[in-house]
Image (cartoon, rainbow, N blue to C red):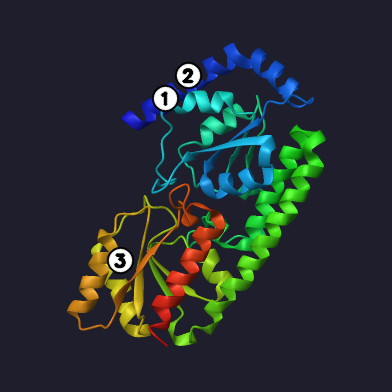
Amino acid sequence: MSQIAKFRLLFIAMIGSVILTACSQHETDSAEGANGSDEKIYVLTTIAQIGEPLSIIGGERVEVESLMGPAVDPHVYNATQSDINKIDKADLIFYNGLNLEANLVEIFEKLSAQKPVLAIGETIDEANLLTDEEGNLDPHIWFHIDLWKEALDHAVEALKTYSPEDADYFEANKMDYFEQLDELKREAEKLQKIPEHKRYLVTAHDAFGYFGLMHGLEVIGLQGLSTEDEIGVSDINETIDLIETYNVPAIFIESTINPNSIQAVLEGAQNRGIDVILGGELYSDAMGEPGTEEGTYIGMYRHNVETIYDALMGGE
C-alpha cells in the first residue's frame, strides 16, 4: 500500500473518530443555527469557484471557506490534518464532484451521513456533460456559465433547506448574482469576433472543453481531463503538428500547472519555424489570489476571456 493510501485511510479513521465524539454537539449547534441564532452558517467548499459565489449569495448570513486556494490543483489534492477541524466545524460542505477532487470523495461520502454534503457538479444532467474519448465525465463545468448557474442553484437550495428563515434572503442574492453572470456571458460574446481559422485554444490540460463549447472554440489539451495523466514526447509532437496544421497563433499556460510542458511545445514549434507565441496565463482549476479581481469567479472568467481574445486576435 502506498504512503498516500495509508494516509488517506488514517485520515478517514480520524474523521470518523471526530464525528463520533462531536456529533451531539453538531446537532445542538445546527439546531440553534437553523432557529434564528446570530451565529453564521459555516460553509466549507473545496474550490473557490464554488466558495466565492456562495459567499456573495450567502452574504452576512454565512461564513465561507475553501480548502483549495490559488495555484492548488484539485485533481491531486490530498487532505491534511489541519483540514479535520474545518471539515468537522462545517455546517454544510459543497464540492464539485465528477472526480475532480478524486482523493476526497471517500471522505465526503462518509461525512454525508452526518451533515449536508453535496457534489454540485453531479446535480447536472449527464446528458449535458462532456466526456473524453474514454467516456470519463469532464468535471470543469464552471467554464460553462449556464451549467454553473444550475450547479450553484442546487447549492443555494441546500442552504435554504438548512436555514429556511433565510430562504428569501438567499434567493434574492442569488438572482442579483445570476444577473451579473448573465452580463458576463454577454461580455464573453466578443470571442465570436475571433476569425474561425484562429479559434483554437491550446492549453496544458483539457480543462476548457465547456469554455470552448460555450464560445465556439476548438480546445486542444496537452494532457487529458486530469493533471495526473502522463505527457509523452508523442503528445508534445502531436500538439505541435496541430499547431502547424491549423496555424494556431498562440498557446497558453495554466496557473495550477507547471509551464514546462507548454514551453516544450512552444520551443518545439519555433524550432520547426512555426510562428506561434505564448499567449499568457489562464486560470483553469483554481482562481487568483483573494482580494484581487482574478480572485473572484467573474474576474477570473473575464481575465481568461480577455487573455484568449487578445492573443488569438493577434492584433487584428
- Mark earlier in primary sequence (1, 2): 2
The percent position of residue 256, horizontal first and vertical second, equals 37, 52
For residue 70, say whether it is visible: yes
Question: Within the image, what quadrant is residue 220 found in?
Answer: bottom left
Question: Where is 187 relative to 286, above or below?
Answer: below
Q: Which residue is mark 2?
A: 14
Q: Quadrant of the C terminus?
A: bottom left
Question: Where is 85 relative to 216, above or below?
Answer: above
Question: Where is 161 relative to 307, above or below?
Answer: above
Q: Which residue is mark 1?
A: 81
Q: Tell me the element at label 2.
A: helix
The percent position of residue 110, horizontal first and vertical second, equals 58, 27
- Residue visible at 69% across and 58% down? 178
Q: Label 1 vs label 2: CA separation?
A: 9 Å
The amino acid type found where label 3 is placed reads Asp
The percent position of residue 205, horizontal first and vertical second, equals 39, 60
Which marked residue is nearer to the observer: mark 1 or mark 3? 1
The amino acid type found where label 1 is placed reads Gln
- Residue visible at 50% across and 23% down? 85
Q: Tell me the element at label 1.
A: loop
- Mark earlier in primary sequence (3, 2): 2
Say the numbered circle drawn on residue 235: 3
